[in-house]
Image (tube, rainbow, N blue to C red):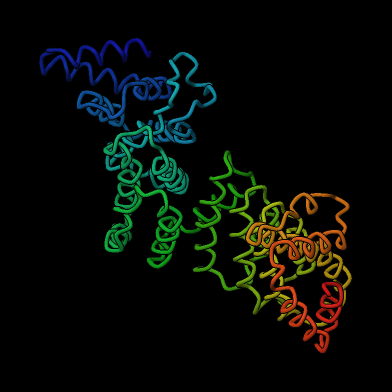
Amino acid sequence: VSKIVDVIYKQLCGNASPILKQVMLRVITLLTRTSPKKVIFQLMDYPVPADNTLMLMWQAAGAESSVAPLVLKTILLILKGKPGTMEERITERRHFSLDTTNMMPVAASQALCTLLPIGSYKKAVAQFFPQLLMALMLQLYYTSNLRLMTEDRTFYARDALRALLNCSGLQQVDIALKRKNCWNQFSQALFHHHGVYLVAKTLSDYNFPQFPDTLHYLYKLSVEGPRRSEDNVITIIFLTELLNNFFKDPFPEEFLVLFRNWVNDSDPAVSKLSLQKIASMAPVINEIENVCSLLIAILDAFLSQDKTVVIRALMTLRRLLGKLDKVTYSSLCTRIACSYCPLMDHACKYTLEICASELKWPTSYLLKDEHCSFELVVLNICNNLLISHQKYIIDLISDTLGFLRSSRTYLRRGSVILI
């Protein structure tokens, strides 16, 4: 089949008569009816962007509604790939060459620009709306980060997404996003996360009828887990915004479980997004059924190797504890206290690391020691103060003596150690 398609492509690129061209395009339609996957993969194997001949072949491949579901399924399979990278060999493509910088997903996005508006595809598009929506959102992210592509290639996923909205009865959503200048900014990598939020928010504002199917698909994606860590970020942003618009806090338990699991995700961006959403639920924290397990997940985040996650977890816990009822708090009091001990040690070392770098204190090697001696660090700091700031020592001692009268025990103790 692939050889027949290739021969037809070469013939169409030549000086074939109009009648012969029509006959060959009809052959493409018939081949798509009998072997849709093989035809689609062969059409994807040509250089990007597609030329006029290839566009005619795409139109011929999309001529019959009976094969539309299989055609879209095949394209969705290709859209799982990340353009510009060497992807694992896809089973259905075993007879075709693999470009070292896989551009098939870009070709698939361009093909959708042709196929989605076709009237005979309306029913199939409605069936696969959630899958197409999220696949194109991810392709927008990949292509906005891709530097191998020329400028005119970066917009096919965007154009396909707009075509999807327009052929799904969501023309007002497309217009609203254009008014917000969303489409023009999607080519900028730094804008993309905000762009995902805007698309989800605008769809929600217009009460898009595909919401139930889209929510179900996002939940399925979240439970199964993403192919790549960056996919998870896009999924969380989209899912959170849909839930914010259609549910009151707290979310239903099945969604809360997802956010609880994401708190300790290996990707710091995922952890922080989840913690941010959980923090916003502080006013209704006592309405959550399994609040203890949620709080324990946040406490576990204190052990993260990423300092920004630790800070976000600390801020989240502080907001939740301010609203938590006394009975629940008392049941977790010991667990919370135990979690704060390593956190305070972490904070002290972090502060000393800043001092070491800013004030040129050679204490870094001491802080890296697993059995760090606090007295040794203080002695080291004092020796450095004597050497580097000797003329200020009298003023330093004088100022430190003032802290001996402090009502706070730790300040009195600290001043005694320093003196």
Residue at horizontal 36 percent and vertical 37 percent from the top = 109
Q: Position of residue 358 (x, y in %)?
A: 63, 60
Residue at horizontal 11 percent and vertical 18 percent from the top = 18
Quadrant for the C terminus, please: bottom right
When asked about the image quadrant of residue 65, the answer is top left
Q: Examine the rendering and report whether any part of residue 293 can be seen.
A: no
Q: Position of residue 204 (x, y in %)?
A: 43, 64
Q: Is residue 358 above or below residue 23?
A: below
**Residue 317 vs residue 22, the one in the foreground:** 317
Q: Is residue 113 above or below residue 61?
A: below
Residue at horizontal 31 percent and vertical 13 percent from the top = 6
Quadrant for the N terminus, please: top left
Q: Is residue 344 above or below residue 286?
A: above
Left or right: residue 281 versus residue 341 is: left
Q: Residue furthest front?
A: 391
Q: Position of residue 229 (x, y in %)?
A: 58, 44
**Residue 325 vs residue 44, the one in the foreground:** 325
Q: Examine the rendering and report whether any part of residue 72 can be seen.
A: yes
Query: Exactly how many numbered labels are in the figure?
Result: 0
Q: Position of residue 273 (x, y in %)?
A: 58, 59
Left or right: residue 226 versus residue 393 is: left
When asked about the image quadrant of residue 136, the answer is top left
Left or right: residue 291 versus residue 184 is: right
When asked about the image quadrant of residue 115, the answer is top left
